Amino acid sequence: MTLFELPVLLGIVVAMALLRLVRASLLVWVLAWWIGIYVFVSRGFATPVPASAQHIYLGIVTLALFAYVTSSGERIRSFVDPLVNFAGDGRYTLALVPVLLALPALAAYREYVNAKVPVEPPFFARTVHPSPPTEITVHDQKIDMLGGDNPLRHLEKDDPAKFAEHVARGKDIYYEQCFFCHADALGGDGMYAHGLNPAPANFIDQGVLPSFQETFFFWRIAKGGPGMPDEGAPGDSAMPEWERFLSNEQMWEVVLFLYDHTGYRPRAREVHAEGH
Amino acid sequence: MNPRLLIAAAIVVLLGLGGAVRVYFALENQAYHPPVRSLGVESGFPREQALKDIAKDREAKAKAKKYEAPTYRTLPFVSSRVAVWVVAQLHLMFAAFVLAVPMFAFIIELIGYFNGDKRYDRLAYEFTKLLSTSFSFTASFGGFLTFLLIMLYPAFTNYLMEIFSWTFFPYVALFFAEAGFLYSYYYGWGKFHPVVHLLLGLGVNVVGTLIMFIADSWASFMMTPGGVSDAGALIDPWAALDNFTWMPINIHRFIGNIAFGGSVAAAYAAWKFLGAKTDEERAHYDWMGYMGNFVAISAFLPLPFAGYYLAREIYGYNQALGIMMMGGAFSWLFIIQAVLIGNLFLAANYYLWLGMGRIEGTQSYQRYVKYLLAAIAVCFAVWATPRSILASVSEIKAMGGTLHPALGVLGVMSAKNTAVNILILTTYVSFLFYRRTGKRPTVAWAALGNAVQFLIFFGVSGFVIALGVYGYFVDAATRIGLSIPQVLSVLIGMVTMTVIDAFMLRGAEQTGETHWGKLPAISQYVLIFIAVTFTWLMGLMGYVRSGLRQHWHVYGVMRDQSVDAFTPTLGFATQVISVIVIIFFAFIAFVFWLSSLHDKPDWGSAGQGPRGSHGPGGGRH
């Protein structure tokens, strides 16, 4: 999948090259950069960039261009002089009229575009990976979320054959239970995923599996959407509480499979500098 | 018309209105009225008797009431959390200021002592003038905070006393020592042998830093308690003091204070510059602002790494706290942080480019400004890109989640670390250009020196970017470890470039003179902007550190049972922080004004010139 709209990028590059050829003035260059970046962030990506991010980028560009123009007297003059000439010189009076008309028209058009935005329900921002409690109880067994480990993990070194068996069982469980939502390739885009909000976790994404320890995923699997802490609200995740259907060992096996299949390693535990 | 008639009419209208209001209230009054009876049967109604009995009963109960130590008390109108928050933050800001200003006053005085340039001495003294009032404000806010804590959170304060009372006597003793050093440093300006005076300055700094270290232990204990049992009983006093985040906070605050103090002092110079009447004054305050800003930015460059160290220890103490901070409810504050820090870098560079205007013959470096700017803008954009973007429902559908397929790549640590390192390097290059403006090296190997510097710059940039890209392909622990070679390469690059530059410009030909004070006014607003942004950042990040505890007074040990045991919304938190910043600058403006009184002519002696000539230190001006 291509990430960018190549014709748009090409258009921007060609326009810039043309400006270079005609030796445009600073004023034109500043406008060109601003418009070019605006077109790039609003039209240049295959998946549109949300308005909030667009505002951040254009804010930065505006600040940077302001800093550039005003950072020396010479540049201020070469930016302002054409504007003053255009506004004050009798030769341009005729050209000034359409510009003066165009400015309010542009503002009106912008208002029109803003007003035309379809009404949408507000989006409730939620924390995608809420921090876990320090301890959970699953099937009468206490799991230490901070210091605990996957009880099967040690087999990876101690008994690789047995480890592979557990991984294979984890794989079976995954494809019996999880893949409907989390997908064949673990990308979170299974056949039911499109009906779900929030979307199922994407295990391919490197911000998910490597960012947490195995206990985190055990907790999410065992307690599901209903076990989401308040901070992950609105907790309307459709993830079932798998502790109702699976044993602890089965859930640890699924976790093993997730890491084994994607090749990621669980997050290492930070060690205090002085070994407290 | 007859005025008497008018007055009479007005009185009638007023009386009529008053009557109407009276009748309205009489009709609306729902309270119990005893029925109107003749005076003969005044007493003995059951209701009145009952009221008396109730009052008696209440009094008896009040007398029998036993003393119970309250866990919390409340204030009218403002929540306890906000009250303590505002006062603690103001105390901290003033404390940071009174710790930082002597630090560079001392450094500047030291430079002046060695190079014999009287300007440095005058500058150091001018900074020190801001201190005495600020010192009183710091102590006043500290006292206010203590009273508030005792009043609003008595049980919690009592617990802290239980753990830390042994630190109080050294703290008080250090405070006395600090007052002694500070005032003898200030009033003794020009009265002692310069070395004695410098030693006094050193004393102010050492004692001030020790005071901060002690206070840091109380605050860091609340977040990452150590040395106590699971139920909170004190086991090891030293472990309570030397808890997980104590040293990282000490270091982070120590460096941050210098940056903060430098920026506020630069803002002071900017304020004086803008009000200056003569070219001489403008030249002096321009130079003062430049020095303050130089100190601020120099201290600012290593600050992100001290921040990483602190964050790492937070993760080390409890991963849930770390996740909460960087991936959970508080992560959005880091986007605001990124925007503010990006602005700081941009402003710092902008100030240097504007500063080239003071020097003749800047053309050779002006043409590089656009490339530096492009690098800064790109890094700024990378740093400010959120991992999960705030979006409307339709935007989220289009992205298939809150993660943008292309921009999501920029939302992780590898990208951010790379961006901040390149930002630092670019700012350094801007400074190098500024330094070299108006000078032409005369050494034979100048061309080679330039080429080597050029190679170092691009080599380090390439290395930092390569490590950043490599970070995407390794696990989290290795990735975090990569930030160390990134930082080290940038530091080594900067040091080697500085050394080469120093030798290359030795005996350089002066091609243009520096005209201090010949600077557009906008540069001074930039200095004020930098100071405000620093203050804002301190409030913001201080809130993150403190707010991480969530519903705990002492994390995992003592729960917050008050009505404020919830994490406020980000919007509310940022508003409180902004109000604190405004209050702080109102106080700072007062301090600036007070210190400017010193230079005003005496009462009744208008026109006889400023008094500064016979004020403290006048002899060495």
Image (cartoon, rainbow, N blue to C red):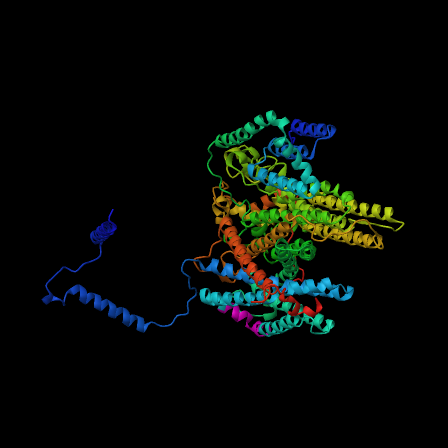
Q: Residue, x 72% and y 73% (percent of image)?
A: B196
- Residue A103 visible, this orientation: yes
Q: Does the magenta run of residues contain B409?
A: no
Farthest residue, direction top: A94
Residue located 48% across and 31% down the image = A115
Quadrant of residue B290 within the rendered picture: bottom right
Say which quarter of the image contains residue A80: top right
* Residue B156 vertical position relative to residue A153 in the rendered view, above or below: below
Which quadrant of the structure image shows residue B91? bottom right
Measured as percent of width and height from the top left, residue B440 is found at 83, 49
Query: Looking at the image, which is closer to me, B203 or B412?
Result: B203
Dominant SS of magenta comes to helix
Q: Is residue A36 shown to the viewer in this render?
A: no
Q: Relative to B606, is B373 above or below?
A: above
Q: Does residue B578 appear left or right of residue B48 in this picture?
A: right
Above or below, B252 against A1 in this view is below
Q: Nearer the viewer, residue B108 or A12?
A: B108
Count of number-bearing discs = 0
Instruction: Tell me residue A89's x, y (percent).
Output: 63, 30
Residue lying furthest front in this view?
Answer: B2
Q: Is residue B164 magenta?
A: yes
In this rendering, the answer to whether A67 lies above or below B618 is above
Q: Quadrant of the C terminus of chain B?
A: bottom right
Residue B414 in the image: state x and y as whole percent.
67, 46
Is B277 on the left-hand or right-hand side of B229?
right
Question: Which region of the structure is painted magenta?
Answer: B158-170
Coordinates of residue B176 in the picture (x, y in percent): 60, 74
In the image, A256 versus A172, the foreground residue is: A256
